Amino acid sequence: MLGERNGHWFDKLRREWQMYRSYRSALHLLSPDAVFFLGDLMDEGQWSDWDTFHRYADRFDSLFGSSSGRPQLHVLAGNHDLGFHYAISPTRLEWFERRQPFVLINSMALHGDGCRFCYEAELGCSKLNNCTNNPYRRPIVLQHFPLYRLNDNDCIRDEDFDEDDPHRDEIYRPKWEALSQESTEMLLRKLEPRAVFNGHAHRGCKKRWSQPVSFWEYTVNSFSWRNGNRPTFLMATISADDVLVGVCHLPYESTVINIYCLTAAVLVLWVLLSVACSRYPMIVRRFRYPSDSDKLIKSG
């Protein structure tokens, strides 16, 4: 959601309308049991106070909430919600804390520098049991940052995961675009996940990990047109044997804009013709019903 400081009202209107209609359509068509938001819900959350945060929260509920409580909503904080590592406020962090049935990780607290947030995050990971003898009890990990990688060259290249993206070779800075290698190794060693879901990069990626444990990592593209022409979301089915993931694409923004422009052009043309018919009925009648002299000339 665009912020109150730098977000233009018209940009805010069309982006949030796109997300609202796309989200409601997806719920109607897919009927999921739970929905996970992987962070960056707000564009200017790192500067918000208590009142501003609650205005964001009320707006979020109006867009994505449900009076019936179905599906269950699970929300992760991103760097645009809290700020990067050194900008996080303990008070602001508490606004996002809830008990969750999955392992939801605050990526900005995985710098490993001994700060309070890092210590609490590592302690929480240490308390989780590694259930390697029961694969179904291995956790599904959800976080905002991707796991450590140099760039997207290790990702599977197909139409569902942005194979034509010209920026796939760009280097990921550890602790900024992805977790550090040390934090990634710590998470994988302590949690041994069945699957990992994340965002932040604004482009999709599906990567296979084989060490220290075998699993798939899924990086989902942004849900908003503001961060790209092709927003997407993931649909996951989790069973005792499998984690099945499908990529759902929303319409291209350029396609929707072209449809709007074409519709507007047709409406303008129709209005002009209607005005012409009302102001100059004789000319219109002449086009519809040629005069007798015109008939004689044609029959000639």
Image (cartoon, grey):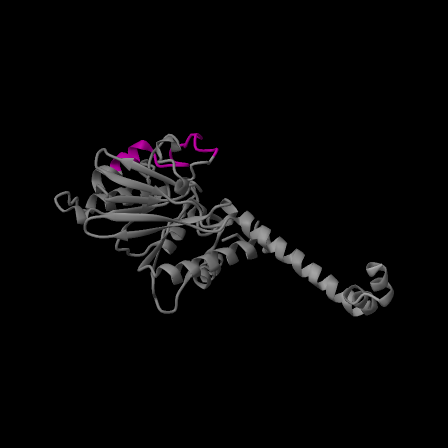
Q: Main secondary structure of the magenta part?
A: loop
Q: Please indicate whether residue 46 sits to the left or right of residue 263 in the image.
A: left
What residue is rendered at 22% in x and 42% in y?
191
Given residues 81 and 259, the one toward you in this image is 259
User: Horizontal and vertical percent for residue 127?
Assistant: 20, 46
What residue is rendered at 77% in x and 66% in y?
288
The quarter of the image holding the C terminus is bottom right
Which residue is situated farthest in the right direction here? Answer: 293
* Image quadrant assignment for residue 79: top left
- Which residues are the magenta region? 166-186
Count the marks: 0
User: Horizontal and vertical percent for residue 112?
Assistant: 31, 36
Q: Is residue 141 magenta-colored?
A: no
Q: Please indicate whether residue 154 sits to the left or right of residue 261 in the image.
A: left
Q: Is residue 298 above or below residue 113?
A: below
Q: Please indicate whether residue 3 sits to the left or right of residue 150 in the image.
A: right
* Image quadrant assignment for residue 265: bottom right
Q: Is residue 13 above or below residue 286?
A: above
Q: Is residue 175 magenta-colored?
A: yes
Q: Please indicate whether residue 269 sits to the left or right of residue 257 in the image.
A: right
User: Horizontal and vertical percent for residue 248?
Assistant: 40, 50
Which residue is situated farthest in the front direction here? Answer: 300
What residue is rendered at 14% in x and 47% in y?
134
